[in-house]
Image (tube, helix red, strand yellow):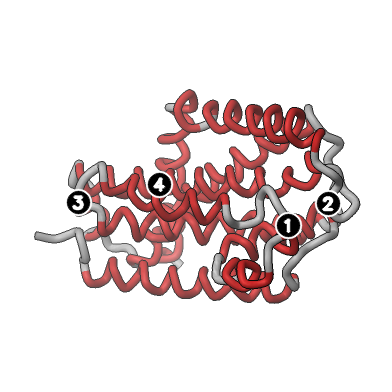
Amino acid sequence: MNRLHHYRIALATIVLKEMRRFLRIWVQTVLPPMITMALYFIIFGKMIGSQIAPIDGFSYMDYIVPGLILMSVITQSYANVVSSFYGSKFQRYVEELLIAPIPLSLILIGFVSGGVARGLMVGGIVTVVASLFVDLQLHNLWVTLSILLLTSIVFSLGGFINAVYAKSFDDISIIPTFVLTPLTYLGGVFYSVSMLPGIWQDVSLLNPILYMVNAMRYGMLGISDINLWVAYGVLLAFVVALFSFSLWLLKRGVGLRG
């Protein structure tokens, strides 16, 4: 019982440290996504969207809202963990965590929880911003919340892996710039995959973000280009695979020693 209490305190300490970190610099972590998403709604929704025909019975503005909310969750979850864990390596206090009498899985969960907290908080704020431009719809609350949570976990783990391998501050921006951003924009946020030619529809199925966006769209609007259970399967597979790989990296000390 004492050991479990000790572990709870350790986990709570890491999570609170992570949350205080991004809340302390909210002008850099919370405010920019709000402004960016407002610009998306104004430019893509109001100006361009008004010229585009409805998609699956929904106005273009309504159609892109789920993807924009999810996009903010993806970027913020990833950014929080990659910057925080790399910072702990750079300042060398990660070594104190590694020698502490707590399981390595607890350390990983703590950092990931911080990323999830920031991702969901920013996602909530972006949802409030979206409500200023559209009448938000909610088809299934539990699908919406579970997809937000699972997606945030996936990209928090992705950020952790990036931080483990990063050797400089430049390295933590390579994956978001050259991998994450293209996959997000090509993940069906701004269009339906059914609008693409046949071969590109097949290629799009290789993009995991497509499944997340469509599951989120189902949760809010009740429509999807992808089977919902397939989307859940993809998300859960990524959670298990990335968590296992991240824990293995910690146990091996990859990028942390020497």
Residue at image mark 2: 55
Horizontal placement of 152 versus 244: left or right? right
Task: State the image coordinates of residue 27 (x, y, percent, origin top left).
Answer: 48, 23
**What kind of element bears circle 4?**
helix
Residue at image mark 3: 167
Q: How many angstroms separate mark 1 from mark 4 (CA)? A: 23 Å
Q: Closer to the camera, 95 or 63?
A: 63
Q: In the image, what residue type sits under mark 2? A: Ile
Disc 2 + disc 4, Cβ < 8 Å: no
Q: Counting residues from the N terminus, which is met first, the one under dot 2 or under dot 3?
A: 2
Q: In the image, what residue type sits under mark 1? A: Ser
Q: How many angstroms separate mark 3 from mark 1 (CA)? A: 38 Å
Q: Counting residues from the N terminus, which is met first, the one under dot 2 or under dot 4?
A: 2
Work out whether 175 lies above or below 31. Answer: below
Please give the name of the residue rendered at 55% of the width and 54% of the height, measured from the top-left corner. Answer: 152
Q: In the image, what residue type sits under mark 3? A: Lys
Disc 1 + disc 4, Cβ < 8 Å: no
Q: Counting residues from the N terminus, which is met first, the one under dot 1 or under dot 4?
A: 4
Q: Counting residues from the N terminus, which is met first, the one under dot 3 or under dot 4?
A: 3
Q: How many angstroms separate mark 3 from mark 4 (CA)? A: 17 Å
User: Which is in the foreground here, disc 2 or disc 3?
Assistant: 2
Task: State the image coordinates of residue 191 (x, y, percent, origin top left).
Answer: 70, 52
